[in-house]
Amino acid sequence: MSRIAYLFPAFPVLHQTFTLGEVLGLKRRGYDLRLVSLKGSDSDLQQDEARPLIDETAYCPRLLSSDVLSAFGRAFVKRPGAVLGLFGKVFAAWRTRATEEPGADVKVPTTLTFSEKMLAIYHSNAYVYLAKSLALVPYAIYLSELFEREGISHVHAHWATYPTTVAYLVKQWSGRPYSFTAHAYDIYMISRMLPAKVSGASFVVTCADTNRRYLAALSENGSASRIHVNYHGTDLSRFAPIERRRTEKFRVMSCGWLKEYKGFHYLLDAVAALASKGIDVHLDLAGDGPQRPYLVAKAAQLGIADRLTLHGYLGHDKLIELYRQSDVFALPSIVMGRYGRQDVIPNVLAEAMAVGIPVVGTNVGGVAELIDSGENGFVVPERNVEALVEALETIWKDPARAAELAKAGRAKVERIWDRDVNLGELAGLLDEYVPDARPDVAA
């Protein structure tokens, strides 16, 4: 049985529980994974089960480190033409792109600060992307040496941007095949190189059918048939429902990175509207991020500061407890237009459904693949406060309907969002495309 390199931009990351769950699940099944991270990770801000993996992860040294420069120098002395050819491969791949960038011409109101706007433009600029991709050539050579020493037969990259660029270049340099998992912003913020990456991959995994359709439209040489949907999944035994008695207070919960694309500012407007209708509503918001000061100021401006609790980052156990104390979970995500960020299927919506509370999401990405509006939750138009208020008010005023939605929501995640089942399907893809990495004994 040979080893698979699992390549990340950073690993582990607190809010990326789906990558953590995937790694732990595949290791339990007996796959020999070599965890590799292009950047370091915060050892303090982690889920408890992630901490042991830090010591198992190979963290790449800096670009100008002696290790990377030595590997690059050795390669250039032995194969100068091939090294220069790698830079040419980057440029040729960079020229492949979607004919129309998603949301590139959409201009919508934004609450981003100037620094956030500059950062968003930096991350989505095609020429910056080219420069950073060219700088990955030495990393690809360095990692090719590492993979050769450690007997790596296949590279699987998470996120379609820089990790997959490295995997693509490793194949060009050493012939070692690769695959990748595409998630959300990594395919919608900038599509440069995506057609080349999809066409060169042994297979592609993505977390929603809406992503699969988008990537299939970019594919060449019959590669569309090698793009597979694999929903992230949730540990349904851990996120188990319990019976909860309603109180006089309407407890609304949300969770996520405090970034504008999560739409939390619209949720504050909805809370203010519900309060104006005489509903004793309270919003519990878990997570942190750059929009925290703006949200605090907006809540004060709306006169609902005492109706908002910002919990910051929470570990799984505390997060589950908060779900179970809530009457509804709402995440009014938005598409950020020219700034590129958007959700596809936020895991927190599925976790809330698993715990057995009704949910409200918006019509972005693949949310409608998870929530059948009116059957197991509500899907409302993005940026529409009135529709959001109506959905939340329905759940508060009609407890029987809310209970039906919650029960149906749990049933839906049991059908499509069971992590163990979905990990089994992912393992099946690995067995199909990388048969020499199949465990000798099933876990």
Image (cartoon, rainbow, N blue to C red):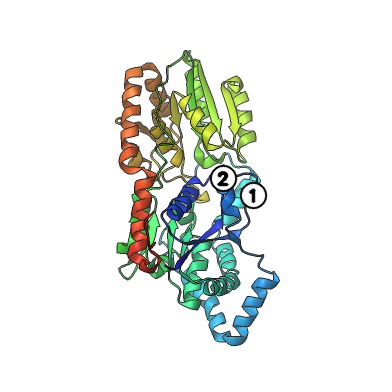
Above or below, comparing residue 112 to residue 392 in the picture: below
- Measured as percent of width and height from the top left, residue 22 is found at 45, 51
For the residue labelled by badge 1, is the local secondary structure a helix, a strand or a loop? Answer: loop
Q: Specify the amino acid type for callout 1.
A: Asp
Give the side of residue 431 with respect to residue 101, left or right.
Answer: left
Near-viewer residue (254 or 21): 21
Give the side of residue 269 with respect to residue 416, left or right.
Answer: right
Q: Is residue 400 visible?
A: yes
Distance from disc 1 to disc 2, alpha carbons, whole Å, reads: 9 Å
Q: Indicate which disc, 1 or 2, sits on the residue closer to the N terminus.
A: 2
Q: Specify the amino acid type for callout 2.
A: Leu
Near-viewer residue (302 or 418): 418
- What residue sits right under mark 1 in the picture? 42
- Measured as percent of width and height from the top left, residue 278 is found at 48, 13
Q: Which mark is residue 19?
A: none
Q: Is residue 270 visible?
A: no
Cβ–Cβ below 8 Å for labels 1 and 2? yes
Label 2 Cα crowd, 10 Å radius (few <14 / some 14-19 / many 20+) = some
Image quarter of residue 307? top right
- What residue sits right under mark 2 in the picture? 14
Q: Which residue is painted at 44% across and 30% down in the image?
A: 329
Q: Which residue is painted at 53% across and 77% down in the image?
A: 86
For the residue labelled by badge 2, is the local secondary structure a helix, a strand or a loop? Answer: loop
Give the side of residue 207 with respect to residue 341, left or right.
Answer: left
- Measured as percent of width and height from the top left, residue 92 is found at 48, 74
